[in-house]
Every structure is written in C-alpha cells, then in structure tokens.
Image (tube, helix red, strand yellow):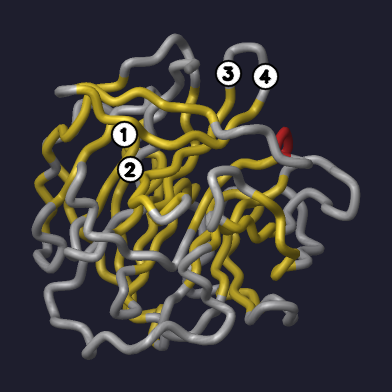
Amino acid sequence: MRRGPAAVAVLAAAMVLTGPVPQAHAAGCDENELYAFVTGSSGDFDSGDILALSTRAKTLSGTGKPVDNRQTGGGANAINPLTGVHWFTVKGNQTYSTHPHGTPYHWRDLSGPSVKDGFGFRKDGYGYFLAETGGRVDVYSFWHERPAGRQRISLSGMDENPVDLAFDGRDRAWLVTADGSLWRVDDVRSSSWRARLAYAADNSGERVEGIALGRLDGKETIFVSGSYSSGERFVSRAEPDGKEVWYDPLPALSGSGSITDLASCSYPSLGSY
C-alpha cells in the first residue's frame, strides 16, 4: 500500500458554555457519507460544488450533489448534524450555508478578512472554524443559530498551524497539519485548547488539506484529503502504526482528482485510534 499524507489540522474552537442536549441527526445528514468540495470541473460537477460520497463499502462512490454552488473557489466545508445544513467558505473568507439543494445564504457575520482553512461541527450543533491572519491561526466557535456571537479560543501546543479539524463521538477535536500529523484536544469546552500530538506523519511529501471522521465498510475511520507532489489528488484513510500514522489511498472514484476539503456528520468514538 502506498504511504501518504497525514491529516490536515483543523477547524477548531470551543465554547465555555455547555451546548444543548444532542439530538438525532437531521434528514439530509447521512452518517455513512463524506461531503467533499470539488475544485475544477468534472462531468456534472463544477468548482465549488459539494459532492456526497458513500462509505458503506470498501470503496467510495458518489451518491449525489447536495450543494450546487455557483460561487467558485471553494475552501472549507462542514455539515451541522442537528439541521443537515451545509456550511462552506469561498474565496478564502466568505461564509455560506444551505440546506441540501437549497439556495446558499451569505453569512456576513462570519465573513471577513481572515482566511478560513478549517470548518467543523460538534455533535451538539456548535460550529468551529480556523481563521488565519498574518500567519497565525485562531480558532473560533459559534452556536449555529447565533453566528454573530462567535468566540475566540486560544490554541497552544502545536508546532505548526492546523489546516482542518473534526470532532469524534467523545467530544474530542482532531486537528491535522499540512504534513499529515494528527493532533488531539480532549477538552473542547474550555476557552483555551491545549493540543497534543497523537500521531506524527509518515509521509513522502504529500500535502493534506482536509479531515473527516466516519466509517468505511463499518470500520471507524479517519479520512484525509490532499495532493501529492505530482499534483494528483487523493482521499485516504489514516492507518496508525505505533506513534506514527500513514495514509492508505482509497481506490480512485470518478472525479476524485478534483476533490479538496472533506466533511461528515459521523461521530465515531475512534477507540482504535
């Protein structure tokens, strides 16, 4: 198996306040799917569209296009498990949300000068994003019904900036850096996050861009997306090996060469990690 990049670190942020009691996942939020941003054009998919990928088998397969995005230049994306609403950024810092097959709404409260590299939701509906300003990445959290009330969370412990983040069923944040190293924050309800290195990357020059959690053929899995030095793009599953992690590329799917960021509304406990 070909070794590959480690997960891009991460959309993060946590609120001090306790969120509402977790509810069942909303319609349109399938625990057995990944949601992937498309870059460039590929068949029926245009740059900025969000593609649904089934993870029920050992290979990924496209199941539809929940977001037909007319704003090109897609960046980070996430899905709220309580509402089934997709959130995403375009042009680096402009934030939108939409129900599947709906018309995207522009959130000016969450748009602004900072580039947003990562986006994710906790299972209780709190959203998090990574915002880069002047080479420094900050983490912000917000309740999905009150995005204007976002709060900044200080992040420490990492030796390089995260590129994306995701949350597991034990309410822990997983962040990935561009080299594929995986970091974890165990207490996300604090006003400050202390990350620790979970797995160092065992890669050969791949660049990671996105991370999502889920199950592949029923097995709990950390997925990452990114590109090789050749420019070829990939979606891979993380395979822990002692204190390191390597990435096993999944069999190519139609249009996979155009996939960038990943998201999901699956919250496995990740006991095997």
The reply to whether discs 3 and 4 touch (Cβ–Cβ < 8 Å) is yes
Give the label, 2 or 3, closer to the camera.
3
Is 59 placed above or below 149 here? Answer: above
Q: Which of marks 1 and 4 precedes in the sequence?
A: 1
Is 261 placed above or below 65 here? Answer: above
Query: How far is disc 4 from disc 2 in space, using C-alphas?
Result: 25 Å
Residue 28 at x, y percent in the picture: 58, 80
The residue at the point 53 percent across, 50 percent down is 262
The circle drawn on residue 231 is 4
**Disc 2 target residue:** 137
What amino acid type is highlighted by mark number 2? Answer: Val
Q: Which of marks 2 and 4 precedes in the sequence?
A: 2
The residue at the point 40 percent across, 61 percent down is 120
The reply to whether discs 2 and 1 touch (Cβ–Cβ < 8 Å) is yes
Give the label, 2 or 1, closer to the camera.
1
**Disc 1 target residue:** 161
Asked which secondary structure carries label 2, the reply is strand
**Disc 3 target residue:** 228
Query: How far is disc 2 from disc 3 in space, using C-alphas?
Result: 24 Å
Report whether 70 appears left or right of 3. right
Q: Residue furthest right?
A: 43
The reply to whether discs 3 and 1 touch (Cβ–Cβ < 8 Å) is no
What amino acid type is highlighted by mark number 4? Answer: Gly
Residue 136 at x, y percent in the picture: 32, 38
In-front residue for pair 31/70? 31
Give the label, 4 or 1, closer to the camera.
4
The reply to whether discs 2 and 3 touch (Cβ–Cβ < 8 Å) is no
Residue 131 at x, y percent in the picture: 40, 50
Asked which secondary structure carries label 3, the reply is loop
Badge 1 local density, few (<14 within 10 Å), some, or many (20+)?
Answer: many
The residue at the point 31 percent across, 69 percent down is 122
Q: Exactly how many numbered labels are in the figure?
A: 4
